[in-house]
Amino acid sequence: MKMTKAMTARVAVATVGGVLLAGVAGAAFADEADNDQVDVNVNIAAIEPVGALTMSVAQSSTSLAEVDSGDPEVRQFDGVLPTVTVTDDRAEVPADTFWYVNGQSSAFTGTGLPEIGAEHLGWTPALTSDDSDGDVAAGPQVDTVLDEGPNAVGLVGEELLAIAPNFGELPTGSWTANANLFLKTPVDVAPGAYKATITLTLWEDPIG
């Protein structure tokens, strides 16, 4: 179809208009991409430590050596639990709570050897702190299954090593404790190298 002069004029105007619009859009895009960035800085001061109730153990292992059991039917092996330290340096100690440390042993095992149950291991806890002031107490002696009495159960379950019973207010400070360990076995126990693990746990519970 042959274009008239009027049609040619309209196409020309539309084309120019399109170019102008494209130019406007390009200018708007350029303005948006040229925005500045602002860095935001802040210095946050460290919060002063408020302390914590914590426990540490001096060593990760100990050894037992044979002693005279005084019983021809029993062999006995003695040692010492490494020093356990409990520290409470909290600025605010929760009211109506108390803390305590329990210990529990696994069985004694060795390659190709019959198991010696944890009921054969006993202990006698003792405080070694000079400044306990009666705020912290040692747990009772736990005898072995080869002994007699109500405490002749061994370290099968969780047994008390030390406790801060809270006589009106929990003390703050640091305390140490250990325990004399004794393993008792039948005289015909299989010889060999045995190993067990005592797990110590620090607990804090509400009173009542």
Image (cartoon, grey):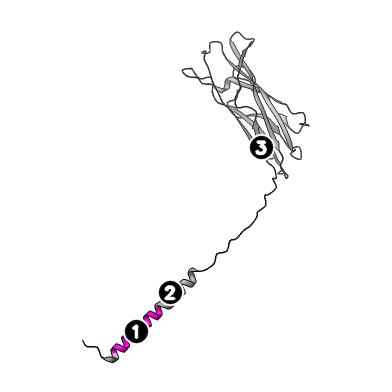
Residue type at mark 1? Ala
The answer to whether marks 2 and 3 mark residues whose Cβ atoms lie closer than 8 Å is no
Q: Residue 100 appears at what percent x and percent y?
A: 67, 34
Which residue position is annotated with label 1? Answer: 14
Q: Quadrant of residue 74?
A: top right
Q: Residue 66 appears at what percent x and percent y?
A: 61, 13
Residue type at mark 3? Thr
Which residue position is annotated with label 3? Answer: 54
Report how far apart the C-alphas of labels 2 and 3 lie in the structure: 66 Å
Secondary structure type for disc 3: strand
**Residue at the (68%, 36%) spot, across then down:** 99
Give the position of the N terminus as an image quadrant. bottom left
Q: Is residue 150 visible?
A: no
For label 3, the crowd category at 10 Å Cα-Cα, with few meaning under 14, some 14 to 19 and many 20 or more, is few
First to last magenta residue range: 7-21
Which residue position is annotated with label 2? Answer: 26
**Residue at the (60%, 21%) spot, across then down:** 121
**Residue at the (67%, 24%) spot, across then down:** 179
Q: Is residue 198 above or below residue 171?
A: above
